[in-house]
Amino acid sequence: MQAFELYQRGAGVIPSHVGTLINLGIMYEDRNDYARAQACYRRVLENQPDHKLARLYLKDAAAGGNVLYDEDSQKKNERLAQLLNVPVTDFELSVRSRNCLQKMGIRTLGDLTRVSEQTLLSSKNFGETSLVEIREMLSARGLGLGQFAHEKREAEPPLDLSGMSPDQQMLLDRPISELNLSVRARKCMVRLQLNTIGELIRKTGDDLLECKNFGVTSLTEVREKLTIMNLKLRGD
């Protein structure tokens, strides 16, 4: 908060330092105040029309300003994404149910919401008792079997662990929140339903750029955060 106020004061000085305006613009973006962010970047370009960073940030801020963002809806989506990523092993299921789910490759609650009752019942040793158990577990959390059956989840590309040290491999199950990304980058992670660092590094830079309102600035940020951990996106 204090840093934000100091940057605001610095921007009020004429002429303002370029770095001050750039940093203040980024802070405005993190507050979803894209209009003021654009104003900061334009002030830089008024004096330095060829300033590449200011042009790049202005483009991203303009894209952000064109998106109407429903904060309440986003919070619900975040909670749902987290819930769908909960492993089924976190629940006290019968041995038969656990074994059947494991054989079918069903690892999370999200996997269960994308599979039909008929598919479960087609599995050997999976009967009505197990089906009722699964139904009750999902129902208690506001979910249902086959709820998202229309969403076909693409198979994750294989992750090459051969060049990774044990310390690097231990980072893969860490939540993305540990990267301390900006608001814009975090929103993209939620839209892509990425919850762990391991899921993130399975994506390429182009995969992330396809996400709505995720630009080159955010991609650079993600790469820099991963570099600190000696990790990188697929294809980098």
Image (cartoon, rainbow, N blue to C red):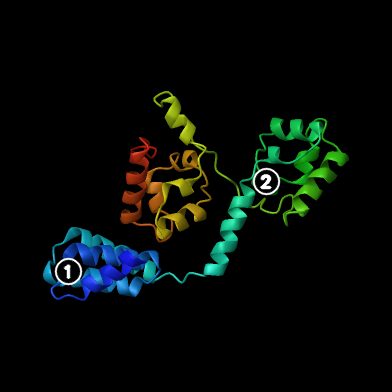
Q: Nearer the viewer, residue 23 or 153?
A: 23
Within-10-Å neighbours for mark 2: few <14, some 14–19, many 20+: many
Left or right: residue 144 versus residue 79 is: right
Q: Residue at x 25, y 60 (%)?
A: 56
From this view, report whether residue 15 is shown above or below residue 207.
below
The residue to which callout 1 is attached is 45
Left or right: residue 170 versus residue 137 is: left
Q: Residue at x 23, y 68 (%)?
A: 41
Label 1: state its secondary structure: helix
Within-10-Å neighbours for mark 1: few <14, some 14–19, many 20+: some
Q: CA distance from mark 2 to mark 1?
A: 49 Å
Q: Quadrant of the N terminus?
A: bottom left
- The picture quadrant where one finds residue 161 is top left
> Whole-percent x and y of residue 191?
50, 56
Q: Quadrant of the C terminus?
A: top left
> Whole-percent x and y of residue 188?
45, 55
Number of marks = 2
Residue 120 visible within the image: yes
Say which amino acid is labelled 2: Leu
> Whole-percent x and y of residue 210?
41, 53
From this view, report whether residue 144 is shown above or below residue 230.
below
> Whole-percent x and y of residue 108?
65, 42
Q: Residue at x 54, y 63 (%)?
A: 74
Label 2: state its secondary structure: helix
State the mark number for residue 157: none
Q: Are marks 2 and 1 in contact (CB under 8 Å)?
A: no
State the mark number for residue 109: 2
- The picture quadrant where one finds residue 87 is top right
Left or right: residue 84 versus residue 4 is: right
